[in-house]
Amino acid sequence: MEGRRRCHHGLVGRVAGTVGRALALLMTTVLPLSMAGSPGAGVSTAATTPTSVLSVPPGRARAPEEAIVDGPTRFMVLSPTLVRLEYARDGRFEDRPSFNAVNRDFPGAAFDTWVEDGTRVIRTERLTLRHRQDGEPFGPDNLSVDLTAGDRAVTARPSFADGTGAGAPSPGNLGGWRRSLDLASGPVPLHDGLLSREGWYLLDDSRTALVAEDGSLVPRAPRDRPYQDGYFFGYGHDYRQGLRDLRDLTGPPMLLPRWAFGNWFSRYHPYSAANFQQDVVPRFRARRVPLDVLVVDTDYKSPDPWNGWNWNRKLFPDPAGFLTWARKQGLRVALNIHNSISPRDPKYAQVRAMLGKDLPKGDCPTECHVFDWADEQQLRAYFELHRPFEDQGVRLWWNDWCCDGSRADIEGVTPDTWLNAQYALRDEKRGFRGFTYARGGSGFTGYGESQQYPQGPWAEHRYNIHFTADTNSSWELLPFAAFYTAAHGNTGNPYVTHDIGAHNAEKLPDDLYARWIQLGTFQPILRLHSNHGLRLPWDYPGPAQESAEAFLRLRSSLVPYSYSLARQAHDTGLPIVRPLYLNYPEHDEAYSHKHEFLYGDDVLVAPVTRPGTGAVDTPVWFPPGTWVDYFTGRRHTGPGTATVSADLSRMPVFLRAGGVLPTRSDYVDHSDQRPMTAVTLDVAAGGSGSFDLYEDAGEGLGYRHGQHATTPIRYHQDNGRQTGNLTIGAAQGHYPGQVAKRAWTARFRDVDPPTGVWVNGAGVGQSASGPGYSYDPASRTLTVRTAPVPTARATTVGFAVGKISSLLSCSQCSQPITVPVEQALPARVERLDSLLRHQGPTRRAH
């Protein structure tokens, strides 16, 4: 037996010198890609094209010190639950990052390793890997990994993909993705995601292109002997750790701008500028329904409404004026794009002049020419067509359909992901947060098809909001859309956008329309869209309109919460919409109630998926603990299933006991209308909890350079639910435009009538509006409002019920202080002062 070797620390998989610096940059920016066909190929660095490379001088990589090499096999323990497996019969191991695996610079993990009877054994605190040293490629016959999935012992026998692009087999997989949901009317099969109930997944990276030392993208060198490169994720039922490992390996999800979490409107319809300026947007404003993004579909184009690269002047006589008006309205404008050009288009002469030749013909509804984006000149010519629109103020491109026969035959990358990356990087060069929204994870296949490529969807989260596309509206599709968003998070991408109301169907039944809007309120992106159909609230007068307008307002008020969840996704890899099994993996119901989900950790959502304009019963599975109905205040205790009835004015949404839900207090037409100087905190009584409110400038790249702030919010309840203490910590960090003062409204849900309420240790009286408190016995809600207070200081709000009159707290108190109810208010305050004087040295909150 070979002696044991124990590794305690070290940066496993670190790449030396300039490459290490390149990887650090990769982890904080969209991965820039070169069109290099081979190492060292020349590339342009013009700011107008997305072909720039990382600004690092040539460097030399070296193998990690703690890699385990056994002849043609190499193992790297990246974390206790993630091991790189590499087989190279020619002895040429690969140290460069790949397009998927942009980072192997992990903090390191302790492990033991030894050889026993010809078998390599590697043991971490979470798994034990065994490999028979037979010199052959990895497979079920020579490789096994023992781990625990819940209370079950599991022996994984991973095998690599067969080279067809089908992916490595994953038993018990919980689903993940497909290129789109085109033509879906209900559930459709999905490709595998990372998470499996068996507790493991093998990500086969053997054929993914590499990132060279200068940051360019290059194919892997040809080999005439077997080669395998993969990553074994052995998370068990710690699914959150699996997603964290995926995030650390493949890079963080992009952080979308704040306005992306407001309401979007889009419609396949020949709108004119006058329609938008005189009807569509004024209706939103008059009805006090917020709107942040206006998507202009394909009819704005000329000479061909499918693929023209000029404005249709009959519909948009003054495009620059229209875009200026939109910006003054606080609207970001996105344009639809189809990736071809008509020979009749005046811009085609510009393309021919740049290339010195004609483009090949494509497959379009009308005659067209298409691009080969692997040709850098054609790529540049293609993006030059976008420039005039961007100069006029277009913010975002909707890469629809894709791609009329245009192609990107880049060896070693998934075509969809590669093109989405080009759009994202282009925006970053304009100083914006780069992203697009498009179909993704596959290639430019037929309508409704979803081909698997060997490289998979594992880089998509860095560039793209996944657009599910042209669905058919039905009651069967509605719950599947909810399930799909949660499952798609298993690819590492927290962003999915459905056509809310679905794409096809002119006018929906009132109840189906209202329930779609309700679902969209708790999705990563709420985007109204249809194929010439009716999706605006005022198209459905009566209860459906009232419901839709109320939920669209709620969606806008949720922006601070949704934006904080997006930052969580960026930092941890957790999705915004979370399947129940992420938090409750040992409960079968967390897997069987597929259309329920968590919006963050503390908000449980169970969409109504049955018809009815009156009260509709929905069976809801409640996870362990206490859950309070957001709309009625009714308390539910889990684990268990209960029937919840909801008419069109509400939906089953619940706040976990101790959970904190921040929303904007004041109405705004759009998210940037004015600074957020008033925030409401809904707190469900019955437990303790916390939430970190994240803020930054909302757009631009300053957040990558430390320009952001977090406000820690903590709720503590004790004395048998008789006292509660909410501490709003001082904002930690700074960013341009940060507010100096903020008024807080705390709504304590599911509490008895209070016998005392304090803000920062001072008692407050009842008040119907303004600073003070009020109590609603019907919903058992205590509402406490503060005056504007400095965000640089902590603020505490306390209440008590029953025999204890209040929970007095302050920034100098090391422990909460309670005072008997029979004492008069002056005596209580004097008692607090006395206690503070005798505490000795004070401890201030930071």
Image (cartoon, helix red, strand yellow):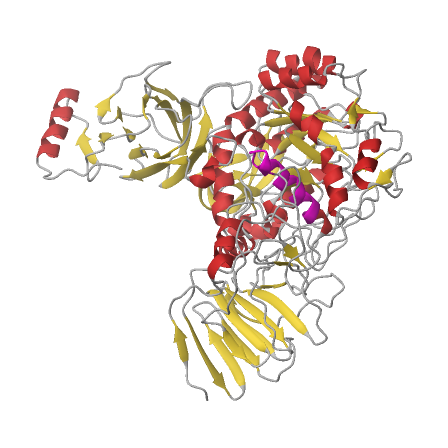
Return the x and y of residue 630 as percentages of the image width and height. Answer: 49, 31
Tell me what residue is drawn at x 56 percent, y 58 percent.
Answer: 213
Residue 761 in the figure: left or right of residue 167: left
Q: Please state, as top left, top right, bottom left or bottom right, where the C terminus lies in the image.
A: top left
Toward the viewer: 608 or 260?
A: 260
Q: How many marks?
A: 0
Q: Position of residue 604 (x, y in %)?
A: 52, 40
Q: Looking at this view, is 641 or 832 the one in front?
A: 832
Residue 123 at x, y percent in the picture: 46, 74
Q: Toward which corner of the image does residue 596 lie, by quadrant? A: top right
Residue 329: in sight, yes or no?
A: no
Q: Nearer the viewer, residue 129 or 390?
A: 390
Residue at the farthest right position:
367
Q: Is residue 377 above or below residue 768?
A: below
Q: Main secondary structure of the magenta part?
A: helix
For residue 384, above or below residue 170: above
Q: Can residue 423 be found in the magenta stretch?
A: yes
Residue 311, quarter of picture = top right
Position of 415 with respect to 821 (left or right) is right
**Looking at the rendering, which quadrant does residue 423 occupy?**
top right
The residue positioned 66% from the left and 65% from the top of the image is: 206
Q: Nearer the viewer, residue 754 or 224?
A: 224
Q: Judge from the rendering whether residue 597 lies leftward or rightward of residue 823; answer left or right.
A: right
Which x, y percent locates residue 772? Answer: 31, 18
Residue 527 visible to an observer of this rendering: yes
Residue at image coords 57%, 51%: 589
Please provide the residue range marked out in magenta. Answer: 417-434
